[in-house]
Image (cartoon, rainbow, N blue to C red):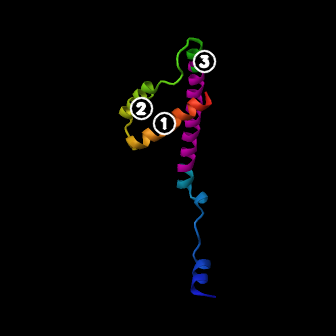
Amino acid sequence: MSLTESVRTEIPVPNASDDPVIRQFRDQISDIDLKIVEAVNKRLGLVRQLKLYKAQHGVAFVDAAREEWMLTFVQRANKGPLSSDGLAELYRHIVEVSKREA
């Protein structure tokens, strides 16, 4: 048996799922992830209603100026630790998915 094999067999590798602190963090993250999904679905429902209303009233669905205004609005409200660039990337993905799925 080589030294490497000996070390591998003698040092136990911790199982992250057995650690109560890791489990607690993961549970909290999972709860937040569910809230994010709920919020995105609620947003999408409103975007669908807005799209229908705009179509009925002859208004273009996409409003690039409004999207930029909203991005600035959420960036100003952001208290971090999410960076302004990170928020812009996330927001643009949310907007693109909303437009595609509305």
Residue at 59%, 72% in the rendered image: 12
Amino acid at circle 3: Leu
Quadrant position of residue 96: top right
Amino acid at circle 1: Arg
Q: Is residue 42 visible?
A: yes
Q: Tags 1 and 2 in contact by the CB under 8 Å rule?
A: yes
Amino acid at circle 2: Leu
- Which residue position is annotated with label 1? 92
Label 2 to label 3: alpha-carbon separation: 23 Å
Q: Which of pointers 2 and 3 lies earlier in the amino acid sequence?
A: 3
Magenta residues, start to end: 25-50
Main secondary structure of the magenta stretch: helix
Q: Which of pointers 1 and 2 lies earlier in the amino acid sequence?
A: 2
Q: Secondary structure at mark 1?
A: helix
At which x and y percent is residue 74?
Answer: 41, 32
Q: Residues within 10 Å of mark 2 (few under 14, many from 20)?
A: some
- Residue 52 is tagged as 3
At which x and y percent is residue 58?
Answer: 55, 13
Residue at 61%, 82% in the rendered image: 5
- Which residue position is annotated with label 2? 71
Q: Residue furthest top?
A: 57
Residue 87 colored magenta? no
